[in-house]
Amino acid sequence: MDTLNPPTLQALASQIKQWGLALGFQQVGITDTDLSAAEIQLQDWLDKDFHGNMEYMQRHGLKRSRPAQLHPGTVSVISVRMDYQTDSKSVMEQVLTETTTAYISRYALGRDYHKLMRNRLQKLAEKIEAAVGPFGYRAFVDSAPVLEKALAEKAGLGWIGKHSNVINRKAGSWFFLGEIYTDLPLPIDEAASAHCGGCSACLDVCPTQAIVAPYQVDARRCVSYLTIELHGSIPEDLRPLIGNRIYGCDDCQLVCPWNRFAKATGEGDFHPRHRLNSQQLLDVFAWTEDEFLRKTEGSAIRRIGHERWLRNIAVALGNATASKQINDALKEKLQHPSDLVKEHVQWALERQLKKYSM
């Protein structure tokens, strides 16, 4: 490693990108560790309490915006992206119009991306080590206090759009991000420039108006936060706006014009398991806890647990077209031992009864 001069490092950076593509990443970029601008934006977001009960967003102090504090010795960051889209826009939009069908954010339909991408990043690090000898590094996939979007933008993978997701001009936004923090002084790539222009499609379509201003998302209103991160009761005024979305939300990505360039993933592990892209609400509402655990094994969905799964589906059933089958299923769940579940089931029943009387 002592003999890594600038030409050698330049060649290594080029080789790293080739290895990354061979490992299944769609793009690899490299940046430095200066996140001072992003740090100011993060602090402003936290000061506004937009993080809700995600206290982990501020738990680690400045480690999130200062990579060398998280992993000492870090001077460069290798940023990667991996596509995950499996369904077409029309298919996803059709599910959203079918009030009795469950909509699950497309990133969670298949195998948990954390493990898959971390394994690939580890293989990439091992290739680097084979080329230069032992070096300091640590791989991350949404697993530590890392400002992955800011790093991806600086590394040229795309720009952070008005909805706060990273957008690539040639690939849209349906992709995961991962990083390798390293002590190798690699040459850095040019940061991506923004191309949202005057478009406000994502702000206009957000079902709960969580995008309170361009580039500012109040997580407390976001459907993804409400159905995944929030542990307690979903605020009553927001429940009708959730529709049939039982795990996350993709609306802001569905309307983004740049996603016309998005490509279907070649990763079989990201394809839907157990028909999670088209399940009926009543069917998944009937899953026992054992069934839930079995059918979400290896999936990001499992993290919310069966109780919140039922909470979310109860809200969706309350928003669905009224039917005797839905009423019967909700009444049966009034016997559930969880107060959280019963509260949302009762709300859904009242919603259904109102629809019957209209």
Image: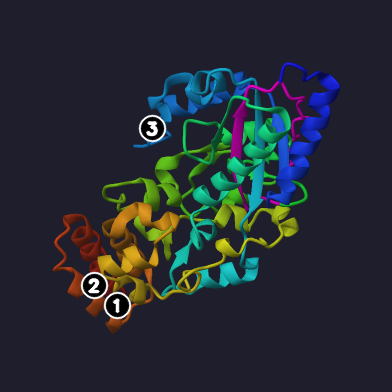
Inspect the image, locate mark 3, and give the three-letter code of the amino acid beneath it: Tyr
User: Label 3 to label 1, Cα distance in Å?
Assistant: 37 Å
User: Label 2 to label 3, Cα distance in Å?
Assistant: 34 Å
Inspect the image, locate mark 2, and give the three-letter code of the amino acid beneath it: Leu
User: Are circles 1 and 2 on residues that touch, CB within 8 Å?
Assistant: yes
Tell me, yes or no, whether the highlighted magenta stretch contains residue 190.
Answer: yes
Count of labels in the image: 3
Residue position marked by numbered label 2 in the rendering? 330
351 is higher (above) or lower (below) than 209: below
Q: Main secondary structure of the magenta part?
A: loop
Residue at 78% x, 31% y: name it.
12
Residue 34 % position (x, y): 64, 19
Tell me, yes or no, whether the highlighted magenta stretch contains residue 82.
Answer: no
Q: Which residues are magenta?
A: 172-198
The residue tagged with tag 2: helix, strand or loop?
helix
Tell me which colouring the rendered structure shows. rainbow
> In which quadrant is the C terminus drawn?
bottom left
Quarter-wise, where is residue 129 in the image? top right
138 is higher (above) or lower (below) than 344: above
Q: For residue 238, say whether it is visible.
A: no
Residue position marked by numbered label 1 in the rendering? 326
Inspect the image, locate mark 1, and give the three-letter code of the amino acid beneath it: Ile
Give the number of the mark in front: 3 or 1. 3
The residue tagged with tag 3: helix, strand or loop?
helix
Residue 197 % position (x, y): 74, 41
Badge 3 crowding class, 10 Å Cα cut-off, few under 14, some 14 to 19, many 20 or more, is few
Residue 56, numbered label = 3
120 sits to left or right of 143: right
